[in-house]
Amino acid sequence: DARVKRYGLNQEDFPRVASLPSVINAIPSRETRKEARYLGTTTNIRLVGCTPDYFRVNHLAMSSGRFITDRDSDDLAMSVVIASDVAERLFRFETPLGKSIQIQGFFFRVAGVTRHRTASAAIGGSLSGQDYNKDVYLPLATLQAIFMPSGFDRQRTSGTTLYESVHLNQITLQVADPADVLTTAEGVREALRRNHPELRDVHVVVPMELLKQADQLRQIFNIVLGSIAGISLVVGGIGIMNIMLATVTERTREIGIRRAIGARQADITEQFLTETMVLSGTGGLVGVLLGLLTPLAFRGIREFVNAYVLDGGTGLTNSELGRMFSQMEPSVPLWSLPLAFGFSVATGVIFGLYPARAAARLDPIEALRHE
């Protein structure tokens, strides 16, 4: 008993959605359930035909070997990359690299093994959960040429042979600006309506929950960092004010002498404000220099952590936190340097104004009597 099921994305849909003006990258993929065999061991897998960009977009990492390349796609190479769980099931006591596994009667050479990746949870109604640890990756062109040369993929279940006419399961699109996501999604729907008038067999997924979550996290970080910076400025300003008040007390007789020989209140105020600006400006310059050295210091810490912590058998290498830390690359925007220096000087002026005015208002006679 055989049945044919036609639905989903086809080869004509890909160039249409990939050519939209706001799209900077388009990654096609085709997934199918198969059984992989090595010697006498078998395991169920998700066979994923994809392009090299699939690796980066899905935040995969290599445990050994390499991922598929453009040359593999051009040559229709019989090479696959297996996930960590597949490698553990099929090669318990062997190194997978260079070995051949059998999938539906065809033999493929293992070119690489991906690291364990935490399964992604379903996010609202936008994205379904995925377990990347049971995948086997091969070039999309190879999958289409071997397993569906006539455009059909054969699935055998319960005595029934089902032929699926699905060229692509998914096309992942990347846009340069998050503000273009919604307009791009509408453009994709219009492009797909040419072959799918009612969009019943395709679905345009816009991960709005993820975008909103990222925006909320960004706002929270901005508020937290802004609050820390504000508290630091207030504390630093209070310190400057206390130092200047102590300076005024120690130099009371000097202030009295200056007033006695003709200095005006404005001159005294200007003198102490200048000293305050020099003090806060020096601190600002030191802070800017430390900020410029921060990326270098972070890279040194990252190399140390990668060498002695992540690769030291602690188990953090395969964690999301470990991968995120190893991929961090700090940078200092040039526009932030004059802004930080300006805030430093402004804080000194604001908190130094009161000591300067207090010095200017001293009675010259009382100041001269001060010991």
Image (cartoon, rainbow, N blue to C red):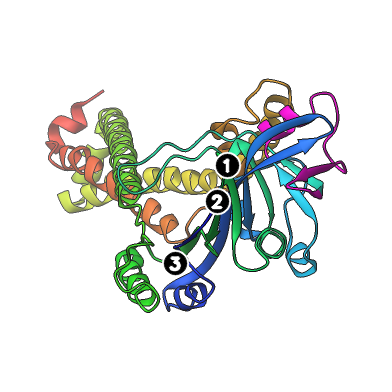
Q: Residue 367: image x %, image y %? A: 18, 32
For the C terminus, the image quarter is top left
Residue carrying label 2: 1
- Does the CB distance between marks 3 and 2 fall below 8 Å? no
Residues at badges 2 and 1 in contact (C-beta under 8 Å)? Answer: yes
Front one among 250 and 148: 148
Q: Residues within 10 Å of mark 1 (few under 14, many from 20)?
A: few
In the image, farthest residue toward the top:
314
Q: CA distance from mark 2 to mark 1?
A: 7 Å
Q: Which amino acid, by three-letter code, is at mark 1?
A: Gly
Q: Residue at x 42, y 56 (%)?
A: 336
What's the mark number on residue 363? none
Q: Amino acid at mark 3?
A: Ala
Instruction: Look at the image and say whether residue 74 sits in the magenta stretch.
Output: no
Instruction: Please name the residue that numbered disc 1 is placed on.
Output: 159
Q: Where in the figure is residue 310, as x and y percent of width and height?
A: 68, 28
Depth check, mark 1 against mark 3: the one in front is 1
Give the residue drawn at x 63%, y 56%. 49
Query: Which residue is identified by label 3?
Result: 176
Asked whether the viewer can see residue 328, the reply is no
Q: Is residue 155 shown above or below 204?
A: above
Q: Position of residue 268 (x, y in %)?
A: 23, 47
Among numbered discs 2 and 1, the one appearing first in the sequence: 2
Real-space Cα separation, disc 1 to disc 3, in angstroms: 48 Å
